[in-house]
Image (cartoon, rainbow, N blue to C red):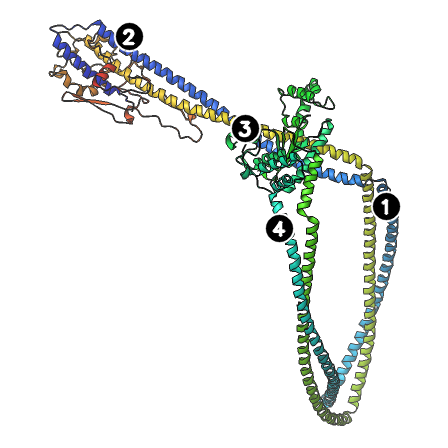
Amino acid sequence: MKKLRYTSVAVATLAAATLASANNKVSADATNNTVITESASQTVQDAVSDAQNAVNSAQSNVNSKEQALSDAQEKAQTANNAYTTQQSKLTDSQKNLANKQDAVKQAQNNLDNAEKLAQQATPENIKQTQKNISDQQKVIQNAQGNVNDANTELNRAQDQLNNAKQKQANAQKLVNDKNLAKQDADNNVSKAEDDVKNSGLNEAEQNVQKVQTTLDNIKKTNSSNESVLKQNQIALADNNKKIADLNNKIDTAKKNVADAQNNVKDKQQALATAQKALSDLQNPVAQDETSGAAGFFKSIADNKDNSESLREDAQTAYNIVTGQPNAYQNITVEWAKKAVDLGQEKDSTSLNNIEKALGYYQHWMTYRDKYGLSHPSISLTAVAIAMLSSDFQHYSDEFNHPILLTAKYGPFYEDEEDISAGDVNPIDNWMSEKADIDNYIKDHPDAATYSFESNYPLTQDEWEKDVDFWNDKPVYIGHYTSMIKPDANYVGLAGNEYEIQPLMNNADSMDEIIFNPVNGMDFDSYQDLVHSYLQNFKQEDKIKTLNANVVTANQNLINAQNAVKSAQNNVQSLQANLAELNNGSTKINKAISDTQAALAKGQENLEFEQKQLDQANQTLADVQAKVGTKAKALDDAKAAQSKAVEALSQVQKALDETNDEVKAAQSNVETAQNNLNTKNNDLKNAQNKLTALNQTLSNLENSKANLEKAQKALDNVNDEALQANKDVITQQSILSSLKKNKEKADAQVITAIEELKQAQSDLTVAQGRLVAEQKIAEQEAQKDNQPTSQPSEQPTAQPTEQPTSQPTAQPTEQPTSQPTAQPSEQPTEQPTSQPTAQPTEQPTSQPTAQPSEQPTAQPTEQPAIESNTQLPGEQKNEEPQPMTTQVTTKNGETSIVEPTNSSSTQPTTKQDAQQLPQTGNQKSSSLIGLGFASFLSALGLTKVNKKRKD
């Protein structure tokens, strides 16, 4: 039901209606003077007091809820801060774990290197290294001698280069002198030529030379053509012989192709036969491998040579891994078939992971031997349960024991179970919890007697006594104590290679069960069963042989096919060669024909040019006879020119020789320098090798100390990594707890906000009631001061001339002449028609100068929820708008209108003219004994809120 709030206007209207009704009643019953009884006035005052008490109580409740909200917010902020801080701590722990894991890998690498070096540190190797050092020192001495020799050779080559350069300078001077002499001879020839110019001698000589050159060229061409002709004739005969031989080879190659093709068919049949033999053997092997552990257990259960208890144990194990109903302990594991992927590579039921788990057991026994404990027997049923427990970590969304999650995943077998995850041997992981005991004993030496190592061998009684001691200590050793339990019965180990969580892989499980009657075997027997099954089902020797047969047959086929291709390629190659030879014969024949034609033409040209030469020589002789002395001078000048050219050529040749000597000497210097560099490098390399040998000797002699240091470093980082992993788990647990606290604190803030809203609403209703009761009491007090002779004419509303500063708490000081000041305003009709004028007049007649007299009755501002109450992600609530009720009268009827969300009448804003101060313990003498609540009830207007009726 919607809450109803009354404004001061509505209260004034209702109060006026009440007074009017009461006056009518009094007028009807009274004769002259009206007397207001004390009991009626007390009733009105009691109503005001009750309303005031309700306001005080509501205000107190609001204050209490505000404080509760503040407290809840402070707790929520504290919880949120703690959660955020813990998230940071968890991140830091995870980073630290990653760093420690990297350090473990690096330390392991260092240890491996140290172990390799320690293996090499034999007396023989040390002695050999010392001998190598001695030999290397001799090598260095030889290298130093080579460097000295190279320096001597370099100096010798440099001297030779200097000598050659001097000879070069001398030869260059001679060349310059002879070049000047040649220039003089050239000038003399030029002068002589000018003298015989236009005599026709040059032209005649040039013509003779021209014709002689042409004749010589023709002779050379003819000689060349004759040689070409002979070569082509020889080539033609050779090419024809090759063609005959090639035709014989082509016939043989074609026969080879046919033989090779027949051989391919034989090899194809041999390959098919070998492949079928291999397939016939591999198919059942593949089926057994796919079944994994199921096939292994089934083979034991079906083997009648095995004992009845072993076959029963194997059949139970088979039923468990295949998800059979009521496989063991009358329990059906509902998720078994979904979690187990039989025989698959990463699954715990794969044959590889079954074989891998054998190493876990052997490693575990090395620990039990240290405590003098017996070796538990292997139970196939326990192995199967361990497989389910291991695969469950991959199947479920949380890393935990399936027996602890039966409410979510269904029932699981009751046994003692240990689980582990991560790239670490699970036995080492479980045994690492011993560090908690060791750390505790460091701080509490008296606890050493309960260390599980104080007695050898460890007995079951001693074990139980020690476990009882540690149960209430701050240690986490449940897996460790399971590993060293003296009376451990029948066990099974299994592990998978799935990704379990982002930081973990390979979930492993060890389960211990108690049989009655006993079912189980010693580890050697179990290991023999596993190895025997793997060897029998894999049939590796037969498969290896058949694979080799297939490979051989396939290779034979490939060889045969290649032989066909080779033979075909040979035929094609020979045919291509034949075509090339035939084409060559055609070209050779054409070349012979062309050459013979060229020789015939050349002979004709030779005869013609010979005649031309004879005529040119005759013409030259005639010109020479005419020129005479000038021609002789020209000949002499040319002869001198030839001698100058010859002399220049000789000295130039000598210069070239000296240039060659300089180049050779320079090359010798460079060679000697390179040789010196090489010898220096050889010396440096020999010295470096000696340094390395000395370092190697030092490493070998100190290898034991280095190995111990590397082992200690690995042990330290391993301990740090285990501690870092525990820190991550601890921080995660704390974060989960803080998350619950945070959610709880946030919920408490929300609850506090709702309760505060409700308290504010109750306060608003109580304030409205107080205003109404005060109004009624105020009007009754005013009536007490009116003349008793005019009861029927007294207006129910005070005139507007009433002083606004006069408090209602002093009715006795009100002027007695006030009612007659404006007789025109006094009502002449029944009072029921007057309330329509009162809502606007009444507020102006009330004093506003005394708000301090009622600090709790009419708060000027409604308490609101501050922004600090806003939850993360929540929009700040708007303050609820109060309901207003307007009361009007028309023709004697009273109607109530309920508009919503009227902002003009919110109690959270100051109301100037409508604020009604409390008048204290004033008493009214009014006859009206009805309180505001009873008046509303009479009109049928009572509204009920969540806690009480107004």
**Does residue 125 appear in the picture of this structure?**
yes
Q: Which residue is painted at 59% across and 32% down in the image?
A: 92
Q: Position of residue 843 (x, y in %)?
A: 23, 18
Rounded to the nearest angstrom, the CA distance separating label 2 from label 3 is 60 Å
Residue wearing tag 4: 283
Left or right side of 47 for 716: right
Mark 3 crowdedness (10 Å alpha carbons): few <14, some 14-19, many ≥20: many
Residue wearing tag 2: 921
Q: Earlier in the sequence, mark 2 or mark 1?
A: 1
Q: Quadrant of residue 349?
A: top right
Of labels 2 and 3, the one closer to you: 3
Of labels 4 and 2, the one closer to you: 4
Marks 4,2: beta carbons within 8 A: no
Residue wearing tag 1: 132
Marks 2,1: beta carbons within 8 A: no
Q: Position of residue 502 (x, y in %)?
A: 57, 37
